[in-house]
Amino acid sequence: LLKDTVEQSVGQSVPSILRAFVRAILNIHSLNPELHRICIEQAFRLRLEHIKQIRRAAEQLVESYLVDLGEEIIPQDKSLAALVLVTTVDTNIHNAMMSSDPPDMDALGEELIAMVLRYLGIEDDEVGPG
């Protein structure tokens, strides 16, 4: 789903691609929230190799995109930036889902997008969900 999202976003602005990417991650997590919550808890306990592979694939996908952006973004170490971005977005979504009072996921997505755009040093060209 993430790879398809990135491929479908070719030619769009960075904020548009980022919105599509964050929404895809939110959609993946919302397919079956209770089952996903249980899987998260077990994955943290067991450190499943499959989870590591999925995360690494996401990092590689993001790193490839960041490399393509080159000097348009602030982070120079694209591999480290990809790790920071994937971990930050995924962890915040997981924490929100496991909260006893989960926030509105669309609002969370917009906050994550704003944070990532600032980290990358990219001005947002859209206002709100879009």
Image: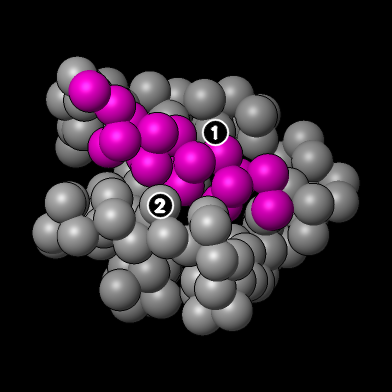
Q: Amino acid at mark 1?
A: Val
Q: Residues within 10 Å of mark 1 (few under 14, many from 20)?
A: some
Where is residue 8 shown, x and y percent of the image?
A: 31, 71
Residue 87: percent from left, percent from top: 59, 47
Q: Is residue 74 magenta?
A: no
Identity, as a three-letter code, of the amino acid under mark 2: Glu
**Quadrant containing the C terminus in the rendered view:** top left
To which residue does mark 1 refer?
116
| Residue under the point 22% across and 23% down | 100
Q: Which mark is residue 41?
A: 2
Q: In terms of sequence position, does the residue under pointer 2 or pointer 1 come before the other?
A: 2
Q: Residue at x 52, y 25 (%)?
A: 115
State the mark number for residue 49: none
State which region is magenta.
83-100
Who is closer to the viewer here, 81 or 70? 81
**Residue at left 54%, top 73%?**
48
Q: Secondary structure at mark 1?
A: helix
Residue 113 vs residue 46: left or right?
Answer: left
Total number of numbered discs in the rendering: 2
Does residue 113 appear in the picture of this structure? no
